[in-house]
Amino acid sequence: MRKAVAIVLLIIVTVGISLSLAKIPFGAPKTKVGKRYIEEGIEDTGATNIVTSVVVNYRGFDTLGEVTVLFIAAIGLGVVLTTSKREEMRKIQPASLILYTGCRLLFPLILVFGTYVFVHGHLTPGGGFQGGAIIASGFLLIYLGCRERRINRVVSNLAESLGGLIFVVIGLLGLVFGGYFLFNFLPKGTANALFSAGIIPIVYIAIGFKVGSELAGIIDNLIEES
Amino acid sequence: MMSFLADYIYYIGAFGLILIGFYIILIKHNLIKVIIGLGILDTGVNLFLISVGYITKGTAPIFSGPGIDSEHMVDPVPQALVLTAIVIGVAVLALALSLAIRLYQHYDTLNLRKIREQKW
Amino acid sequence: MTFIVSFLVVFMLVGAVAASAFRDLISAVIAAALVSLIASILFYFLQAPDVAMAEAAIGAALTAAIFIIAIRRTRRYEE
């Protein structure tokens, strides 16, 4: 009975979506907002990566909302999983010598690569979210390879809170100097240089720290063996 | 037929993923399999959004050198929205899995039919 | 060019059907990570390098890792 209702619903959804997809041509220009952002992007913000200038400058308030959603998910996971009863202690096997040495060798290289990706977010493809995910993958390697170590919870919470605080403080400074929240008040500099594009590198560094320590904290909460 | 396939192959791929994600959520009874279906549905919708913003013979919207013209660039607004959507997707999956772990500790099974039969 | 894209899309749909049909949950998670990886390649063909990087790092690596950690704390086989 339930399967029949589900199949009928799927057929209705299929017919509806394919009738409306036939009207959208593939590859034709559809909106005018994108053209305006491409043509006037470098004069307004100074960043040569147009996707970065849309995420941080033209649509900065949506990024603040997304950072809040990630924060709420991390806190919710911490609250749900701490009040569990004690499971039986599983014996952790120590890792072999090759695995231990290899993971210790690879971990600083992954951290440096993640930092490079989010510092150069306004010049090349990359940015805060991608760099934060790469840093969290480095911490996952430590959990899998050298199995006795845990990350320091005090430092991780401090990095996460400081990242969010710097983002909001820069927005409020923009309100003081310019007139609206997240106004770009630092000098724009020349294009294609590292210190250019106003507040965009500072905001992306704060987001990179916050997302990296948040995802590492989520993995630490899930792995906790009582 | 070949030109129709060449134009709409990305739409067919995204649409197929959305359908398979819906099928898994409606029919299967294991809770972790339902959460896997939610993740596949998320990936399908993101693929559809990016393929709507593509312009034929366009390049990526990055001015990497001094002499690049801005005539044929792809639309940058859907890419910014999908970047946000991917990160929110992983946050929702993490919270759903933590609730599934608590449910297993309380009922000792993850079969949705058996959980619905026990009222307590 | 169209031939490569068609082959990748067919592979992605076969992977999604396999994720729905496997009874061992860890195999289903690996099939879902394969879907995310091929979607990241298709994002690159659609001229979106930022989104391809984000999907490869978050969808293919971190999602599979948190699923396998959660499966280890519950049952492995679907009933």
Image: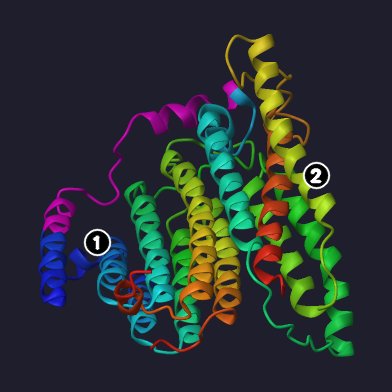
- The answer to whether any part of residue A125 appears in the image is no
- Quickly name the residue at label 2: A158
Q: What stretch is highlighted in magenta?
A: A16-44
Numbered circle sitting on residue B8:
1
Q: Are marks 2 and 1 in contact (CB under 8 Å)?
A: no
**Type of residue at label 1?**
Tyr
Q: With A100 as the anchor, is A4 left or right in this view?
A: left
Q: Which residue is most to the front?
A: B120
The location of residue A2, given as percent across then percent down, is 15, 74
> Would you say the magenta stretch is mainly helix, strand or loop?
helix
From the viewer's perspective, is residue B85 above or below residue B36? above
Residue A2 within the magenta-colored segment of the rendering:
no
Q: In the depicted view, which residue is nearer to us: B43 or A36?
A: B43
Numbered circle sitting on residue A3:
none
Comparing labels 2 and 1, the label whose residue is closer to the camera: 2
The location of residue A73, given as percent across then percent down, is 56, 51
Looking at the rendering, in which quadrant would you find the C terminus of chain A?
bottom right
The location of residue A115, given as percent across then percent down, is 77, 51
From the viewer's perspective, is residue A126 above or below residue C30? above
SS for dot 1: helix
Q: In the depicted view, which residue is nearer to us: A195 or A60?
A: A60
State the CA–CA distance, disc 2 to disc 1. Answer: 49 Å
- Provide the chain ID for the residue under circle 2: A
Q: Determine which quarter of the picture holds residue C2.
A: bottom left
Looking at the rendering, in which quadrant would you find the N terminus of chain A?
bottom left
Q: With B10 as the anchor, is A10 left or right in this view?
A: left
